[in-house]
Image (spheres, helix red, strand yellow):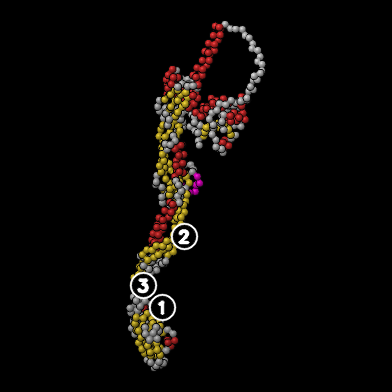
Amino acid sequence: MKEQILHLDPHDDYRSARDKMGWTQTQRVLLVWPRRGPKVLSRRLDLLLLHRHARQLGAHLALITTDSEVRERARDLGLPVFPTLEASRHERWRSRPVRTLPERSERRDLPRPDVHTLRPPALSLPALPPWLVWTLQSLIFLIGLGALGMLAYAVVPSATITLKPTVRPISTQVEIIADPSLAEVGANGLIPARLVRVEIGPETDTTPTTGSKSVPNESATGTVVFTNLVGTAATLPQGTGIRTTGSSAIRFVTTKAIAIEGRIGASVEVPIIASEPGPTGNVGLGQINAIDGPLGLQFAVTNPAPTTGGTLEQSHMVTEADRQRLQDELLAQLTAKAQGQVEAQLQPGEFLVADSITVTQILIETYEQSVGEVADAVNLTLRIAVTGLAVNENDARASAQQTLDDTVASGETLLLGQTQFKRNPETTLDSNGRAHFTVTIGGAAATQVDRTVVRQIVAGRSLAEAQSQLVSRPLGVPIAEAPQIVVRPTWYAHWLGRLPWLPFRIEVIIQS
């Protein structure tokens, strides 16, 4: 509930206190008594009139004082009283309707006279002449009538003055810098930002390989001749290993079993195949001349003709570019998913800064094929940590509002409810991870009008003179339209045509 706090000075009386209350538009008014100095507003009548004025304004009145005399009278009138402002905020309160009860000292039950008590004899006064009695009665009547007229003339009339000060539109563009290292809104457009972190994966993707590599295809074949060196019959089993001699031996195996008769110099021809595919198995004649194992002591071997048929073929191979391309594609997929998860964690009023999604850590990165490996495709499994920058638009609005307030000239006030705010959706990130964007904020500034000065200018003046004074007299502010003055009651305005003499009977309304 809105409240207005008014601090009384030691010299304040009912009129100055009422002027301070003015034409409040709050629901509560708190009058704070001074702690030192002479007592102010201690009369019951002062408190009663202030209570009535607050009720006319539609507000509840409460007093902040430790003066026992004031506190006692306030409670009699139904006014809440608190020792401090802090105490008033810890309790729900309302002022009761105005009551006009006499003070406690006047509420004593007077003793009823005893019917049997003898009255003292009345004093006998000399009789006055009838004409003198009539003259005195007429004079008293006229004096009373004049007093009533003066009271009605001074108190009963009221007036309402409606002023419309000049209004000018104002607008400014503010550059906002959202910094994740800040904790609160600062000056010059600096506002805090929030880093939102999510983890995505693990997920696996694959891509075709683009490298090419020659790999052995077919194994070389041929024949060799075994010769018996010791004259002992033997059987050469299938798969008997033979080889070339030299720095790098090339191995072959027999493809079938064969028997050699038991005489020196006996020979037999056997088909062979290279142990490894490819052209390395294509050797010239006579280059195969060694037998693996103990058979090499019993037999000699040679190839009477070159071996042939060892070939190569082109196959797909994994390259570093294939792995990098796959990583980029999978990172893009995971980053897109991460953006949705970051947006899901935004708080009310926040927006995600464009292009702020950043991969901060690769948690899992596993390739199933290595560079240079023959394969038609390469597979990758990734799990990553991603952060995004979230900015609260209300912080940007508050920072822009500070800048707009600074553009209001002295003697002006910013009109409430007319502020317009628009954020440019384009954002950029600097090297420090701060987001930059601009906002446009605008509103209307109106010149300030001192209601007390206005009341002092027009009090007791005729309507025409008041109109002229408000327009011509330097109020310190320009007025956009001619002031509107309404005096009540209508008979007072018709016959006397003047505004009330008492300034507190004049209400000043400022139109925006």
Q: Position of residue 507 (x, y in %)?
A: 47, 26
Label 1: few (<14), some (14–19) or many (≥20) C-alpha neighbours in 10 Å: few
Q: Nearer the viewer, mark 1 or mark 2?
A: 2
Q: Secondary structure at mark 3?
A: strand
- Which of discs 3 and 1 lies nearer the camera? The answer is 3
User: Left or right: 511 with respect to 142?
Assistant: left
Specify start and end residues of the magenta stretch as a single range: 178-184
Residue occupied by mark 3: 215
Q: Is residue 226 above or below residue 495?
A: below
Q: Where does label 2 land, which residue? A: 363
Q: Amino acid at mark 3?
A: Val
Q: Is residue 507 in the magenta section?
A: no
| Residue under the image location 56 percent in, 38 percent down | 91
Is label 2 or label 3 in front? 2
Name the residue: 43% across, 24% down. Answer: 485
Comes first in the chain, label 1 or label 2: 1
Badge 3, how many Cα within 10 Å: few under 14, some, many 20+? some
Q: Which mark is residue 248?
A: 1
Between 344 and 441, the one lying in front of the other is 344
Amino acid type indicated by mark 2: Leu
